[in-house]
Image: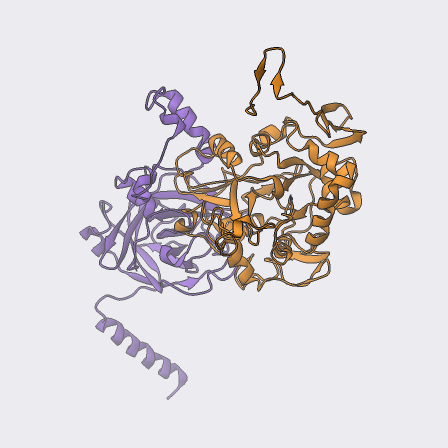
Chain colours: A orange, B purple
Amino acid sequence: MARVYNWQLGREMSYWYPESRPQRQFAAVFDTNKCIACQTCTLACKTTWTSGRGQEYMLWNNVESKPYGFYPLAWDLKLLDMLDGGKWNGSRYEGQTVFESAPAGERVLGWRPESEDYAYPNCGEDDCAGQVDGGASMAMPHMNWFYYLARICNHCSYPACLASCPRGSIYKRPEDGIVLVDQGRCRGYQECVKGCPYKKVFFNPMTGTSEKCIACFPKIEQGIQPQCFVNCIGKIRMAGWISKPQDARPENPIDYLVHIKKVALPLFPQFGLEPNVYYIPPVHVPTAFTRQMFGPGVDDAIKTYRNAKNDPDLAGLLCLFGSSEMVMPRWRRQGDTVTGLDEKGNALVRVPMNEPVHVRPAYDKLYQIARTNCP
Amino acid sequence: MTMKRKLALAGALMATVACQTKAPVANEVVAMPVAKLPAAPQDSGWSAASEHTAKLLPQDLVDPRLMKASTAEVRVRAVASGSEIAFRLEWTDPVVNDLPGPGRFLDGCAIQIPRVREANPPDPQMGQAAKPVDIAFWRADWQASVNGREDSIRALYPNAAVDHYPFEAKSIEPGSAVAKEMAARYAPAQAVGNRRVGPRVSPVEDMVAEGPGTLSPGPGGSRGKGERTDGGWSVMIVRKMPEGLAPRQRTQIAFAVWEGSKEETGARKMRTGWIPLSVKESK
């Protein structure tokens, strides 16, 4: 094993291969507070990529309710149990990663879901964390909670699927860091399925190979955001490129949210993969839960997010989510207008931070008729 | 008694024991020449060959390893005819594993022979750089496919409900070029010609390797057939005669067995080291 630096853990760790970062890294920010679990993203992906034989059960993109939703069943709980929860000391992770805790004979600590584990993708949907007694729904704030977690492949900097494959059939593209399974080389051993802690590699029994989210790379190559991003009606997602922390640029939207404002956090950083989908944590969930899921930055991230109304740059950037199908590698705010820019600084989209308000009188004098509130 | 005499006595004793054994166990795999190769694993033609029982070891040299031994041994017979040589591998396996799927693994076996016959053979663990090994690999799911199992998800999951495949839309003629092209879009492994994709026309696949992790499609021509026996598998694999192998010549052979119910796949297997392989002279 090589020694590599994982900035999400604040330390070096062991990995199967030496550190080799791509020229640029595909990354995304999901705002969990805006997700309504409509599953439009899920279907956008499903109809685009996984409508074939052997792909019936596959959801490269899924949205699960937390705390009781899982796809596959208990994917996160099983590994957390195997890792004994993990232990942080401030922003430094002092527990073991899936690489460091790999048992003898294994490259990665993992487990294999069985067919039945994929059979209940809506398990736990909209289930609250606790009992809602009579009248509780009228009390504010609500005493119980759940939230929606949209998930795709994290296109990790240190992918466990890639490390697990004894044939080198999985590779990370040097040009964009997207992790792919070579469909010509894969022999379907399912080591990657076992190794990926997020369970985002799927075995196709009809082709005999494993398949996974490809970050819609044919679209990314054209500068367009993936299907699950552009079809998101809640506008919770933004795709882009992330720099290493020391190279963070404020004009890069992903860098700004992850490195500068630290409002978007990785999913289960303690696994050690340096995942590249970042989540703005739900503001209404007990942080004992979200700290385990998103790491020790949760409290500060929620504080920053709640303060967005006093932070025009942060609020402005959040307005850019879902505003264009194009990837916006740069952005700027001028007054009340936020602009998404391409690499050369050309405007891709302009968004007002505050929509103009029009008040229509209840009675239309011109037509001499009362208006209703229906749109 | 001198040492020389002691050795002579010991040799005589061993010869006596050997004579008393009904079916002597060869310390090498000897292929018996036959006029015609058997057509199936249970044909009587296999009785012409002596049986070699090869002890199996867990593959515990490279990760991912098999940490717990499973199948103990494989019983091998070999016959040769003209330019072909056939092997019959039999082993105990009470559970049939021939359904692929997530978390499901398949029963299988393989034979491995060095591409070049030489005094210093390649590493028995999948060969080594510039010293390739030829592998013929049989798998139970491919056999089921050849035996007529439908190539559909319902054959693997009888209760599967499929709403719709785009390439089976009413507007598309079934089996047409348009339907096939659209189906291939959703089967990338098929689109790039990966031989994993069903349906199978042979239960045996030819591979070549030059070390662990280098397995790739090899020159074709091998064939075979596997059948269930009482509590195990009986599999015959026919391949071309190894280059330069003739009576009074030797090469090497290695065997591997995968037990699907033990999640054995790829490098997680029971295997042998090299075992001498020869062809008996015709009488």
- In the picture provided, is A142 more to the left or to the right than A243? left
Res. B211 in view? no
Q: Horizontal and vertical percent for residue A67?
A: 53, 53
Q: Horizontal and vertical percent for residue B22?
A: 21, 68
- Report the residue that reaches farthest toward the top: A366
- In the picture provided, is B188 more to the left or to the right than B280? right
In depth, the one of A18 and A225 nearer the eye is A225
- Report the residue that reaches farthest toward the right: A335
Res. A291 in view? yes
How many callouts does the rendering have? 0
Q: Residue at x 49, y 30 (%)?
A: A48
Q: Examine the image and state in which quarter residue B83 appears.
A: top left
Q: Residue at x 39, y 86 (%)?
A: B2
Q: Horizontal and vertical percent for residue A224?
A: 63, 28
In depth, the one of B150 and A82 nearer the eye is A82
- Report the residue that reaches farthest toward the bottom: B1
Q: Residue at x 73, y 37 (%)?
A: A315
Q: Quadrant of the N terminus of chain B?
A: bottom left
Q: Horizontal and vertical percent for residue B5?
A: 36, 83
Q: Examine the image and state in which quarter residue B256 appears.
A: bottom left
- Report the residue that reaches farthest toward the left: B44
- In the picture provided, is B236 more to the left or to the right than A133? left
Q: Residue at x 73, y 49 (%)?
A: A303
